[in-house]
Image (tube, rainbow, N blue to C red):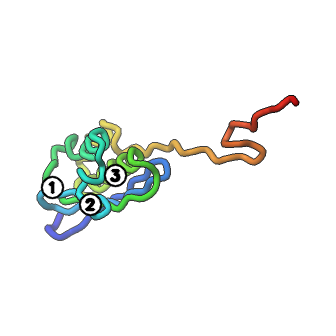
Amino acid sequence: MADTETIWGLGRRKSAVARVRIKSGSGQMFVNKRPMEQYFCNQLERISVHKPFEVTELKGKFDLHVNVAGGGPAAQAEAVKLGIARALVKVNKELEPKLKEHDLLTRDPRMKERKKYGRRGARRGFQFSKR
C-alpha cells in the first residue's frame, strides 16, 4: 500500500451505514469529522470499533476517516467495525482468515420488520374493545 493511497470499506448494520477510509498513518480516528472518543462516548462501542485492529495487531498503523449515518450509536459502531474489517482485507488479503475467525466480516442481516396495514406495528394489533 502506497503512503497516500486511501482504501474504502463499507459497513452496514440495521439502518446505519458507515463509509470508512483508511490510509497508513499514526492511528488517528475521526468519525463524522470528530475524534472517535468524542463521537462514541460508550466504552463498549469504542471496544467494538477497535476490535478489527486488535485482532490483526495493526493498532496505530492506519489513520481512519469515517462517515456514518442512520441507526443508533450501537448500530453505527457495528457498521464502522464491519467497514474497517472490509478495508483491512483490501489492504492485505492474508488478514481475511483471522478476521473471519473472529466473525468480523459477517454482515448482521437483522433489520426492523416493516409495519403492516391494519396493525399498530409490525405484529402488534390494535387493542380489542368488547364494549
Q: Residue at x 21, y 69 (%)?
A: 5
Residue occupied by mark 3: 80
* Amino acid of disc 2: Arg
Residue 16 left/right relative to 28: right
Corner quadrant of residue 42: top left
Eye-nearest disc, 3 or 2: 2
Q: Quadrant of the C terminus?
A: top right
Q: Residue at x 24, y 67 (%)?
A: 6
Q: Could you give the CA–CA distance between mark 1 and mark 2, rounded to whole angstroms? A: 14 Å
Q: Is residue 108 above or below residue 17?
A: above
Any mark on residue 107, and which? none
Q: Residue at x 42, y 59 (%)?
A: 69
SS for dot 3: helix
Residue 76 left/right relative to 1: right
Residue 82 left/right relative to 29: right
Residue occupied by mark 2: 34
Q: Residues within 10 Å of mark 3 (few under 14, many from 20)?
A: many
**Residue sitting at the far left:** 26
Residue 103: x and y in percent read: 35, 38
- Name the N-terminal-most of marks 1 and 2: 1
**Residue sitting at the far bottom:** 4
SS for dot 2: strand
Residue 54: x and y in percent read: 20, 42
Q: Is residue 30 above or below residue 128?
A: below
- Name the N-terminal-most of marks 1 and 3: 1
Corner quadrant of residue 56: top left
Residue 126: x and y in percent read: 75, 38
- Name the foreground residue: 120 vs 11: 120
**Residue sitting at the far right:** 131
Residue occupied by mark 1: 27
